[in-house]
Image (tube, grey):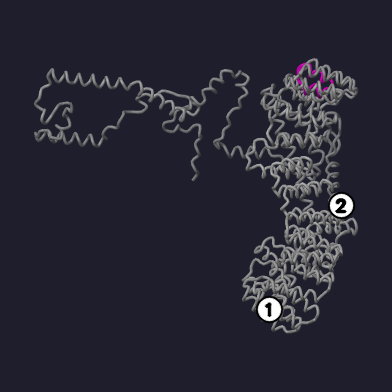
Amino acid sequence: MFAAPRRDFLNEPAPENYVPGLGRGATGFTTRSDIGPAREGPSEDAIKAALAKRAEALENGEAADEDDEERFRDNENDEGLFASGTYDEDDEEADRIYKEVDDRMDSRRKARREAREKREEEEYELKNPKMSKQFADLKRALSTVSDYEWASIPEVGDLTGRNRRGRQLLQQERRFYAVPDSVLASRGPAAYDNAVDRGEGTTSSVDGTITDFRQISEAKDKMLGMRLDQAGTDSVSGSTNIDPKGYLTSLSSTITRNDEISNVAKNRELLMSVVKTDPKHANGWIAIAKLEEQANRLSAARKLIQQGCDNCPKNEDVWLENMRLNQPAHAKIIAAKSVQNLPRSVKLWLEAMKLEGDINARKRVVRKALENIPQSVTLWKEAVNLEEDPTNAKILLARAVDLIPLSVDLWLALARLETDENARKVLNKARQAVRTSHEIWIAAAKLEENAGNTSRVEIVINKGIAELLRRGGMLERDQWITEAEKCEREGAVVTCQAIIRSTLGQGLEEEDQEAIWLDDARNSVARGCYETARAIYAYALRVFSTVQVLWWEATNLEKQHGTRDSLFGVLESAVEACPTSKDLWLLYSKEKLNVSDLEGARLVLSRAFEHNPNDEDIWLAAVDIEAENNQHARARVLLSRARQEAGTERVWIKSVVLERQLKDSEAALELVNQCIHEYPTSAKAWMMKGQIYEVENRFSQAREAYISGTKSCPKSVPLWLLLSRLEESQHVIIRSRSVLERAALANPKSPELWLERIRVEKRANNINQAKNLVAKALQECPTSGAIWAESVSMEPRTQRKPRLISGLKTCENDPILIAAIARLFWSERRADKAKSWFEKVIKADSDIGDHWAMMYKFLENYGTEEERNDLMSKFVAADPHHGEVWTKVVKDVNNFGKSKDELLKLAASQMSP
């Protein structure tokens, strides 16, 4: 059986309720015959049943049922109580009165009701517009369509799938396949005499050129074979080495090129239809010209853009594109035509000027342009720039400001060319012409500064600000800071400072001033505008003279970007404004020492004593100055006075440290015993006492000192560690373990104690016990980078990286763990990775001296001398105070008096990857 053929869509019956043209907004009319009765009548079966029942009732002679009587009863007639009543004149009058009342009440609300209904109808139509109203403007526009445009509308194709099989067959017929050369060769010349005129495998074109298809095919095969041979042969050994990926890539590039060619053809066809449909569409001509230019059809592009100029002579973009596509000689002709059509186009005149090679020709073009457009600021600027003689430039600018008095740039350019006296006159005229220009007032202030009248700069700025406030041309505070920075870059420092002093407090609440001014100064420093930042700090310090943060920021600015005199000037003002700030006094004395001014440092500290009597920091700073300069007798005297007048724990500890550095053990013991008597809970004193005994090899007394110290200071972890290490040094490992266990009871969850317990077991070669302690320690202290680093060192080399990754997830940005990563890369000799991680360590925490020593050791092997010197300078500036190895090196009495550079090198010598 064959399936019934599918009916054509256009020949099928229309669906129910279909109205032709309704989708396009067309409306028709509908009759009663279209929609039928208002309600459906009884069915045919019901009618037959009713007729049969009625016939049966008539035959039997029965009367109609009461239901039938009820059905035909008049509802308007009264029943029941008023069934027997009569309708007289009184009833009629009552009905008439009620009707008048109803009409009266209805007329009172009629206006409001009709207005409400009209408003609701308008709102409904606005929200639910009819199709005909939506396309009303388009239907009206159809009246302007020409016959040619109607004829250009394409016919609607058959999109219903009709004759699909026929279309597929047609597409197959339209496909073309390249016939193999073997077929052509096998047929012989007799088989294609109609296509070939003479010669085997040749054909003749219109111009007489003979084409040999066989030679072309052979040449293609030969070229392909050569390329494959080159791609598949190694130039050194001659071995085959075909790269299939590269070959496929070249094929894909060829396919891409073919796609580009097809896209160009499609775009060309589309754009040609655009310009043919609307020849006045300038952008269409430009687009198709650029398309031809990209397709390397420059001559076609020039022809098309010329057609665009002919069709759109009043569009400057078409003329500019035409000039760009042509050679300069022909472009000049096009430029002349363009300015004839658009004599007031500044862009066309400027392009015509650029086409001229001679400076005089350019001047002639610009002056001709100014004759047509005398109000163009751009043309006047070009004319002035072309003048080499300042006199001619001034003449042109004078004429320009007469014609364009509101151009601030022209006024300022004229003022720059004039002498100081004439420049003042020019700026006065400019100020009268442009009342709201701040540039003119700033230029006037710069003029006074250049003339040496620095006292008048601020007067000019203040006068200008008052004028701008009155005229409504006042800038915002941030804009004034930008103008000040611009003045600084131009070398007008006095003007910059005057702007800051006059505008910095504009529009700020008093409680917000300090924070905002700090941000302003820091932002200016970040942009490299240090004079502006100085002016901001100076203004802020006049308002908040006792705020130490402002003085610190100003001091740092002078340290980094100022001179020695400016730094000392700021510090002198700081200590005078804040005489009770010991930090500023100490910084002042430190900076004096940095320039080897020992007497100046002593004088600063003596002044500090006057304002801060018996301050331990100042006492200790004075002692450090004397000790570092080998004035030990004076240091001892100062410490003796400090113990009598201040007598703090730090003073006593400093006294003991000085005697230890001078290797006077008896004096150190005496002082430390006195310190313990004064401060029995001083953990440092107990530690120093034990260390003094250890240096003299008096281990039993050292043990007693440490034990007494742990009883007095059970929360001091370093004391417990010293006692444990003393027991371990005496080869009593059991006592060392017991000490650490008792310390852990007194200091639970201490990472230092867990770390020491692990290392004790490692040094005793109890690796399994050490691993067990690592597991317990990570449970107690999961965020300790030191314990994670120690656990990594105990893993096999292949397991270290996963362990480090787990540690980083648990304790992110821990400097000790980051240092472990850097050391791992260092051990693997991956210098670049190790260096980047060492830099991260320094940024994470610059106060750990061990990390500086590690990086210096690394740079000794993989860095340059310049990198090591740069690291050393950063290290000195950071001045670290922590680290296991670093603190041992610094506190070693044998290293007393050595510089920071030497101490860093000593610490680096003890480092290894």
Q: Position of residue 177 (x, y in %)?
A: 73, 41
Q: Which residue is mark 1?
A: 708
The answer to whether 908 is drawn above or below residue 47 in the figure is: below
Measured Cα–Cα span from mark 1 to mark 2? 87 Å
Helix, strand or loop at disc 2?
Answer: helix
Give the mark nearer the N terminus: 1 vs 2. Answer: 2
Q: Amino acid at mark 2?
A: Gln
Drawn side of residue 731 relative to residue 421, left or right: left
Which residue occupies the foreground of this view, 297 or 883? 883
Q: Is residue 521 magenta?
A: no
> Is 235 on the left or on the right of 459, as rendered?
right
* Picture quadrant where residue 858 is located: bottom right
Quarter of the image where one finds residue 760: bottom right
Regarding residue 379, the answer to whether it shows in the image is no
Picture quarter containing residue 516?
Answer: top right
Residue 442: x, y in percent?
77, 29
CA neighbours of label 2 inside 10 A, class few (<14), some (14 to 19), many (20+):
some
- Residue ID at (73%, 60%): 614
Q: Is residue 347 magenta?
A: yes
* Dominant secondary structure, magenta: helix
State the mark number for residue 230. Answer: 2
Going by the numbered disc 1, the residue's amino acid type is Ser
In the image, the segment drawn in magenta is 332-352
Horizontal side of 89 relative to 218 (left or right) equals left
Tell which of 400 and 521 is nearer to you. Answer: 521
Element at label 1: helix
> For mark 1, does the 10 Å Cα neighbourhood hold few (<14), some (14 to 19), or many (20 or more) residues?
some
Question: At 51% from the left edge and 32% from the top edge, which residue is drawn?
Answer: 10
Residue 704, placed above or below residue 633? below
